[in-house]
Amino acid sequence: MKHFLALSFLLVVADVQGYSGLPHPLALASSFSQIYHQLDKINLGNCSLADVSLPLDATKSPLPAPSTNLRLKYVALGRGTQNYTCPSNVPSNSQTTIKPQAIGAAATLFDASCIASSSLALLHEVPAIISATPLGSLAFTAALVAQGTRSDNIIIGEHYFDAGADPVFDMGLSGSDFWVATWKIASTPAPKSTSGSSGDIPWLKLGYKKGSGIQVSSGYPRLPDLSIHI
């Protein structure tokens, strides 16, 4: 129930920021007030992940399991962009259709530990919801919700590719100095989502290359949003 209220608040704010002709403003203000008072009792970040397990059996070809001496440290939902480029050796007057090449991605990471600890099914459906919300609106709403709940910070990090084309997960926005640059160990096609989203990139198992505070990571990304399990 508490996560339903929080998601309702997020969706209402997203709708408000995307539409200026608001009907029934008094009713809308009343809804905001009721939800906001309930949020004061809710913790949306930094929940225990002791009982959360990775759904490695959700794909047709399971990924290798993480080492048994590791513990789940973060579950985050990322909202960002996939970056592409065109080959530089194509003549400017060419009539040939060239497929763009993926060269990396950038995303803001939002703490999803409380959703993951209560409902993995909900966790995998949320990306389809936030993909329609502009990143600026989403970040503003997350900051607003964090202020109105018992959550320290819902925006916990950034994902990007460094100069060496290594995928990096920097959790500095959570107040820590944890970060990790990774490399791909294994890949498998993403499972179908019940929300009907398509175009999900493969799930990956990522290995430690360098970093601080995070020894090994396993990541399972989705586009246009990035779900990270470290």
Image (cartoon, rainbow, N blue to C red):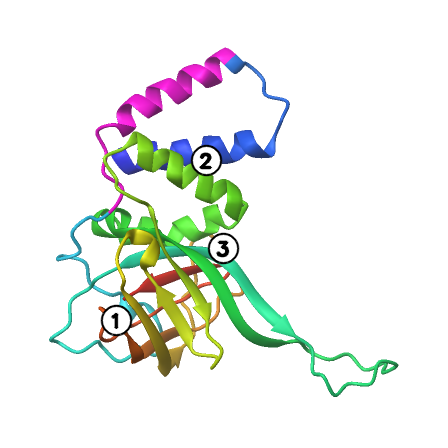
At 61% from the left and 30% from the top, the residue drawn is 19
Secondary structure beneath dot 3 equals loop
At 56% from the left and 76% from the top, the residue drawn is 103
Inspect the image, locate mark 1, and give the three-letter code of the amino acid beneath it: Ser
Marks 2 and 1 close (CB-CB < 8 Å): no
Which class describes the residues within 10 Å of circle 2: few (<14), some (14-19), or many (20+)? some
Please provide the residue range marked out in magenta.
Answer: 26-45
At 51% from the left and 50% from the top, the residue drawn is 131
The numbered mark, 1 or 3, whose residue comes first in the sequence reads: 3
Compared with residue 62, is residue 76 higher up or lower down, i.e. above or below? above
Inspect the image, locate mark 2, and give the three-letter code of the amino acid beneath it: Leu
User: Mark on residue 11?
Assistant: 2
The numbered mark, 2 or 3, whose residue comes first in the sequence reads: 2
- Residue 24 sits in which quadrant? top right
Res. 1 in view? no
Inspect the image, locate mark 3, and give the three-letter code of the amino acid beneath it: Gly
Compute the Cα span from label 1 to label 3.
37 Å
Question: Which is nearer the eye, 178 or 208?
Answer: 178
Q: Which residue is mark 1?
A: 212
Locate residue 162 relative to residue 77 in the image: left or right: right
Label total for image: 3
The numbered mark, 2 or 1, whose residue comes first in the sequence reads: 2
Locate residue 24 relative to residue 86 in the image: left or right: left
Q: Which residue is mark 3?
A: 196
Residue 32 falls within the magenta-colored stretch = yes
Locate residue 43 relative to residue 97 in the image: left or right: left
